[in-house]
Amino acid sequence: MSSTNRNYRATFILDNRGKEDSVDQIVEGVKAVIAEVSGSVTAVENIGRKDFARVTDAKFPAASYVQIDFSGPASAPSALRERLRLNQNVYRTLVQSA
């Protein structure tokens, strides 16, 4: 059976409150996780800091958004979400098929 790579666009909301890690360092860590799930990054776009439409935590009203385009197998999105689930630097993850 041949493995076919698909293209994905992942949007990450990063949480670096009270941490020394910069957004670029967090993105490098996320790119390493994408490589671990057999993905290859094609593009990275730092969207910048945006306010949340619905604030769930008064101490966290805005965050940095980053979009990463990557290609990988069909199992990559679920594996990526699972590996980033416990990562304190990644607040939310949305993976869409591109």
Image (cartoon, rainbow, N blue to C red):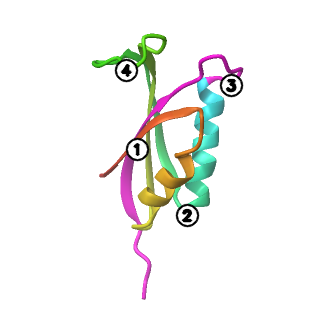
Please tell me whether residue 76 is drawn above or below residue 49 in the rendered image: below
Q: Secondary structure at mark 4?
A: loop
Q: Which comes before the other along the chain, label 1 or label 2?
A: 1
Residue 6, percent from left and from top: 37, 63
Q: Nearer the viewer, residue 32 or 19?
A: 19
* Three-letter code for the amino acid on which mark 1 is drawn: Ala
Q: Which residue is mark 1?
A: 10
Q: Which residue is at 59% across, 32% downward?
A: 89
Q: Which residue is mark 2?
A: 38
Q: Which comes before the other along the chain, label 1 or label 4?
A: 1
Q: Say which quadrant the N terminus sits in.
A: bottom left
What's drawn in magenta, residue-wise?
A: 1-22
Label ID, residue 44: none
Task: Give the spatial CA distance, label 1 vs label 3.
Answer: 20 Å
Please tell me whether residue 8 is drawn above or below residue 25 in the rendered image: below
Residue 52, percent from left and from top: 34, 18
Q: Are marks 4 and 3 in contact (CB under 8 Å)?
A: no
